[in-house]
Image (tube, grey):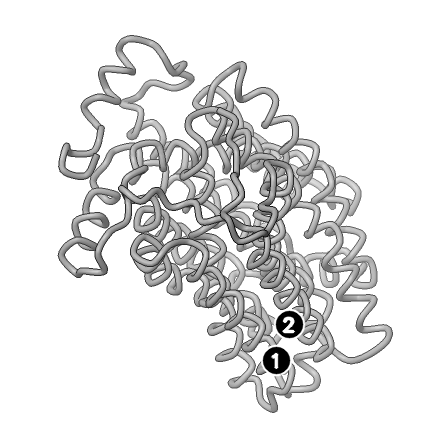
Amino acid sequence: MPFHMPHDGSGKRRAGPREIVALLAGLMALNAFAIDAMIPALPDIGADLAVATENRRQLVVLAYFLGFGVGQIFWGPMADRFGRKPILAAGVALYAAFALLCAIAGSFELLIAGRIAMGASAAVTRVLVTAMVRDLFEGEEMARVMSLVFMVFMLVPMLAPNIGQAILWLADWRAIFLVLAAYGVAMWLWSFWKLPETLHPEYRRALDRAEIWQGVKLAATDRLSIGYTLALTAVFGVLTAYIASIQQIVADVFGAGHLIGLVFAGIAAPMVLASWGNSRVVGRYGLRRTGHAGLIAIVAVSVLHAIVAESIEEPLWLFILLMQLSFVSFAFTTSNFATLAMGNMAPIAGTASSFQGVTGTIGGALLGLVIGQAFDGTQLPFLIGCAICGGVSLALVLWTEKGRLFAAIGRPEEEEDRAEEAPPPELA
């Protein structure tokens, strides 16, 4: 449903719907930029900070994911109590400060600590972007807006490694963190000036342990919430494994380390179009039909890719093509599953988003760590890990939907299920 952001009497012109989407996407892109811009810098970081083992350099990426997951525990309940805007401002300011800490780190251990703290600060964007979209939209419209946010957000993986590489041509890896800090400051100013408060007054919750636990318990026991959260966790395992492994795969398997920026952009580019396509088709075919089809495609392409890599000496162009197909499918899955997971969570959107984000991010990071550390000089461990993650996600969706895929919202039996899964009256 469309929404209108009124003037608040302060004289500031609040953002309209298009600017809201762009602003939320820009906030989400803080994370993508912080992760993907580091990929071409990993060899330089290892050389400068005396990290000889290539697999250990993956910690620069995975440490960020760890902090990103843990940090979400705190931001959601605080946003449900104090409102979205002040909590967002605090998190983005800390993000910029810890980026500066990483820029001056004199040891690998301090860099990793800074990356954890940076990720924990940036977790505010994951929690609050999801919660704000849930505040403003419902159903397929929420999925459409999330797709548009992710479409802009996915432009960053196309650009970030190349931006990181360009910075490395002019300066050392520390300059990348200075650019990240500057981006954080710019987003802080934009959001502070233009972003309205979206928390409905009737949904404001006390910062009380019992009440927070009640919200977490609801998010963890609601079938849609926990089922699609765990399914997303397995899918995110594919993404984190890819980000952690891609530099080594391109450099060591294909001998094309100098092309990492172009390879990354080539794989990410179709995801942008797919996200835009999802925003169009989800209104026609529904969340479940679109999301389930995307997940089945992920499994099918991952299995095919593993068979191809095992059977022939895979050329780089074929690796890129098959990864493009995987991540196009990924784009038709993630925003729809995230919307389904939040379907019954309107009264506790911040707390639910925290719980779901912590579960998905930490779980996905651990899966990515296991897959990434299995790198043996070939792409096969990565591809087998992707296929397994996709299969697990499909099994979880089957459990969530009681063995029924592609159900269209609005069918009588589904409405009956949704009524059974609705929040208890005291939270509604």
Residue furthest to the bottom: 106
Residue furthest to the top: 412
217 above or below 397?
below
N-terminal of the pair, mark 2 or mark 1, is 1
Residue furthest to the right: 170
User: Residue at left 66%, top 74%?
Assistant: 177
Where does residue 268 sit, x and y in percent of width and height?
Answer: 70, 44
244 and 152: which is toward the camera: 152
311 above or below 401?
below
Q: Of the numbered discs in the image, which one, if any, rests on residue 310?
A: none
Where does residue 218 sit, x and y in percent of width and height?
Answer: 20, 42
Question: What is the quadrant of the C terminus in the image?
Answer: top left
Where does residue 397 sit, x and y in percent of width and height?
Answer: 36, 30
The residue at which mark 1 appears reads as 100
Where does residue 309 sit, x and y in percent of width and height?
Answer: 65, 43
The alpha-carbon separation of the residues under discs 2 and 1 comes to: 6 Å
Q: Do the residues under discs 2 and 1 have CB atoms within 8 angstroms? A: yes
Question: Along the horizontal axis of the image, is 230 left or right of 120?
Answer: left
Badge 1: few (under 14), some or many (20 or more) residues near its Cα, within 10 Å?
A: many
Question: Along the horizontal axis of the image, is 211 left or right of 34?
Answer: left
Amino acid residing under circle 2: Ala
User: Residue at left 45%, top 49%?
Assistant: 197
Question: Along the horizontal axis of the image, is 115 left or right of 248?
Answer: left
Amino acid residing under circle 1: Leu
79 and 410: which is toward the camera: 79
90 and 372: which is toward the camera: 90
The residue at which mark 2 appears reads as 181
User: Residue at left 78%, top 57%?
Assistant: 261
In terms of secondary structure, where does tag 2 sit? helix
Badge 2: few (under 14), some or many (20 or more) residues near its Cα, within 10 Å?
A: many
User: Residue at left 58%, top 52%?
Assistant: 11
In terms of secondary structure, where does tag 1 sit? helix
